[in-house]
Structures are given as structure tokens and as C-alpha cells.
Image: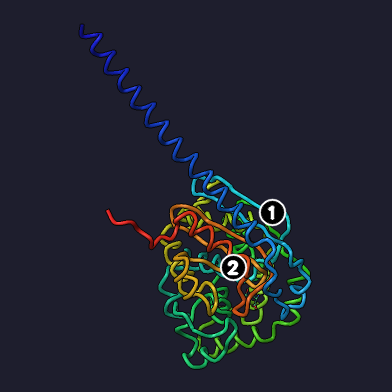
């Protein structure tokens, strides 16, 4: 009698477990299908958009194939969803600023960045010098060029090579892949970056630089020339979404606290002068680069990246903005969007 009672209970427990498993599987299968269709739809919807123009103030960027269009969404459990061009690489440009900022905060803590550079939107163009002069090198942020160069000047390492190694190791940790510098882009920008050199000297005049001005500007120029495809960028975004641990290699690259600070700067200053309107529309921290990439992060859920070189007037990829906006909305992934209990 007792035995029968016991086996009835275990049968019941087994049924409950099976039932729960079936529900979980149904939910995750539905989510997978949802993600796949959101990406596919975005791709088809925007594939033929011809608005925008490649950046050309760095001569080599004007020559990049403006038809490249790749999407990668990677969840915090390491599932990779892709559509379109996954092989073409573009230079990471300003998106690299996210990772040098992460490196500096992780090594030195958040306060030094806030006090020496600032974490406020400037309302100015990304390479503007006026606000530096006006605010004496402070109250900018690590994503406009002046602040980004100053951030790179704080990278750990005794000399150029050690600092470069710190940057590369970190970027590769985020991407979970070996990365390389796009030599023509690096040389093209190094030959034309006098404005950025001037920003470094201006920042130094206000004691906001922590290392040699010209070597730092060169290091910064090189970090911007690192080549990435949509999947590399998607994984970098997914590592941020996963609190600083790469969801595929399982390696911890930076701490969750570091990521929280980095995401806040992405929210206020990630898309140049259009950072406010972007956050208003999507609710997600993002960062764009003049190479044509944009990454966006839904904390605790997924990272997404789109590469499509033609940019709008604010310097943000037209197709990348449209696609990410569409996918976030389709998946109901705006973190500010909460249904009442
Ligand atoms: N290397 C570029 C520059 O300094 C980065 C700009 C960007 O992507 O916003 O002009």
C-alpha cells in the first residue's frame, strides 16, 4: 500500500516535470522562432534602402563596399542568430571606445573617468574641440574623440606595445576571436588625424591626458582600425549583455559593475548627436562607429550588431538603426517597457 502510494507520487512528480519541460521547450522554441523571424524581416525590409553615405573624411572608408549588410544577435546563453553578410569586415571605429572605456574602468575604477573626462552628453559633434575649451577638458564623455583619446591614454601598460596588447587582448576577449588591424584604414587615418592630435594636446593642456599625446593618438587611431564582422560585434555586445563574461568562451573579460557604468555612457552618448532620440525610440544602450557598425545591448538578454556602411547626417548607419529599432520592437525588448502586474 505504502509502496503504491510512493510510486503514485513519483509518477505524478515525473508527469509534472515532463509537463514543465514541455512548456519550457515550447517557450524557448517560440522565442527562437521569434528571433529568427525578427531578424529575417528586418533584413528583407531594409535590404534595399539606399539612403546615407559612407564616411569619407577618412579616405579609406569611402572605398568600403556600401552594400555590406549583416546582422548578428547573440543571446546570453550563447545562441547565435545571423542574417546577411557575415564575412565582410569593416573597421570598428568608435565602437572601440566602448571597450577601451571598459578596460580603464575595470583597471582603475569608475571615478577617475568621471572626474578627469566626464560622463555627460556634449550636444556637440563627436570631434568637436569647443566644449573641451569651454569645460576645461572635463564634463565631456569617453565616446567623443577628445574624451576617447584621454581614455586611451589611461590604458594599462608601460609602453606603446604593452598598451596595445592590453587593448587587443580585451577586444579579442569580448569577441571570443582573434582580431586584426585593417592596415589601409589605419594608415589612411594616421595620415589625416591632425585634428585628433590637436584634441589630445588640448586635453593635455587641461591635465586630462595620462600619457604621451602623439603616441596615445596613434594608439587610438589603431584601435579604431580593428577589423570586425557582424558576428564579432554581436559577440562583443552579447558579452556586455552577459555582465562582462563572454557567453560562448565563458571567460570573464570585465566585471558586471564595469559593464553597468559602460552601458550608462552608451545610453547617453552612444549615437553621437542622436543619442537622445535613439534612446527615446528603442530604450537600449548602443554605440555606433563611422565604419558603419552599431552594437546594442539588452542587459541580461542579448547583444545585437548590424554592419551597413552608409551613414546619416549624424554619422550613424542608416540600415543598422532601422534594423535594430525594428528587432527591438518586434521582440518587445525595450528594457523600459514593462507590463503592469
Ligand atoms: N577614428 C574615428 C575618428 O577619430 C572614429 C570616429 C567614429 O567612429 O565616430 O574620427
Q: Dot 2, crowdedness within 10 Å: few (<14), some or many (≥20)?
A: many
The answer as to whether callout 2 falls within 8 Å of ligand 1 is: yes
Q: Is the image coloured rainbow, by chain, by secondary structure, or in one colour?
A: rainbow
Secondary structure under tag 1 reads loop
Q: Tell me: 296 left or right of 62.
A: left
Residue displayed at 45% across by 61% down: 259
Image location (x, y in percent) of residue 9: 27, 18
**Based on the displayed image, in which of its 4 quarters is residue 310 positioned?**
bottom right
Residue displayed at 58% across by 78% down: 149
Residue displayed at 44% across by 66% down: 283
Task: Please determine whether, in this image, residue 142 is positioned above or below residue 176.
Answer: below
Image location (x, y in percent) of residue 125: 57, 84
Residue displayed at 71% across by 60% down: 89
Q: Dot 1, crowdedness within 10 Å: few (<14), some or many (≥20)?
A: some
Q: Which mark is residue 312?
A: none
Q: Considering only order in the chain, which callout, 1 or 2, is on the residue closer to the N terminus?
A: 1
Task: Please determine whether, in this image, residue 273 is positioned above or below residue 3.
Answer: below
Q: Ligand 1 appears in which quadrant?
A: bottom right
Q: Nearer the viewer, mark 2 or mark 1?
A: 1
* Residue furthest top as drawn: 1
Q: Which mark is residue 95?
A: 2
Residue closest to the eye, 310 or 95? 310
Image location (x, y in percent) of residue 202: 57, 89
Image location (x, y in percent) of residue 340: 29, 56
Task: Please determine whether, in this image, residue 162 is positioned above or below residue 199.
Answer: above
Secondary structure under tag 2 reads helix
Give the alpha-carbon distance from disc 2 to disc 1, as whole Å: 18 Å
* Residue furthest left as drawn: 1
Q: Which residue is mark 1?
A: 86
Count up the numbered dots.
Answer: 2
Amino acid at each position: 500500500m505504502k509502496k503504491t502510494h510512493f510510486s503514485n507520487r513519483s509518477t505524478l512528480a515525473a508527469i509534472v516535470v515532463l509537463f514543465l519541460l514541455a512548456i519550457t521547450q515550447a517557450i524557448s522554441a517560440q522565442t527562437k522562432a521569434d528571433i529568427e523571424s525578427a531578424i529575417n524581416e528586418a533584413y528583407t525590409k531594409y535590404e534595399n534602402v539606399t539612403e546615407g553615405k559612407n564616411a569619407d573624411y577618412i579616405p579609406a572608408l569611402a572605398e568600403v563596399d556600401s552594400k555590406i549588410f549583416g546582422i548578428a544577435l547573440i543571446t546570453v546563453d550563447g545562441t547565435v542568430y545571423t542574417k546577411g553578410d557575415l564575412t565582410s569586415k569593416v573597421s570598428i571605429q568608435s565602437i572601440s571606445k566602448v571597450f577601451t572605456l571598459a578596460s580603464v574602468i575595470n583597471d582603475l575604477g569608475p571615478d577617475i573617468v568621471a572626474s578627469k573626462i566626464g560622463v555627460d552628453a556634449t550636444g556637440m559633434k563627436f570631434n568637436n574641440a569647443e566644449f573641451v575649451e569651454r569645460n576645461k577638458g572635463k564634463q565631456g564623455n569617453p565616446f567623443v574623440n577628445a574624451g576617447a583619446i584621454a581614455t586611451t591614454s589611461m590604458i594599462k601598460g608601460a609602453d606603446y606595445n604593452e598598451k596595445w596588447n592590453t587593448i587587443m587582448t580585451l577586444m579579442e576577449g569580448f569577441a571570443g576571436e582573434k582580431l586584426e588591424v585593417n592596415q589601409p584604414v589605419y594608415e589612411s587615418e594616421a595620415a589625416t588625424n591632425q585634428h585628433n592630435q590637436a584634441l589630445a594636446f588640448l586635453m593635455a593642456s587641461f591635465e586630462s591626458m595620462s600619457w604621451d599625446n602623439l603616441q596615445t593618438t596613434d594608439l587610438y587611431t589603431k584601435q579604431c582600425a580593428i577589423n570586425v564582422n557582424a558576428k564579432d560585434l554581436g559577440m562583443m555586445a552579447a558579452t556586455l549583455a552577459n555582465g562582462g563574461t563572454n557567453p560562448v568562451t565563458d571567460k570573464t573579460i570585465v566585471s558586471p559593475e564595469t559593464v553597468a557604468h559602460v552601458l550608462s555612457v552608451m545610453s547617453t552618448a552612444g549615437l553621437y548627436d542622436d543619442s537622445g532620440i535613439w534612446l527615446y525610440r528603442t530604450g537600449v544602450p548602443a554605440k555606433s562607429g563611422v565604419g558603419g557598425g552599431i552594437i546594442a545591448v539588452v542587459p541580461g538578454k542579448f547583444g545585437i550588431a548590424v554592419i551597413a556602411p552608409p551613414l546619416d547626417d549624424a554619422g550613424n548607419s542608416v540600415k543598422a538603426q532601422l534594423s535594430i529599432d525594428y528587432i527591438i520592437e518586434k521582440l518587445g525588448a525595450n528594457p523600459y517597457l514593462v507590463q503592469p502586474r
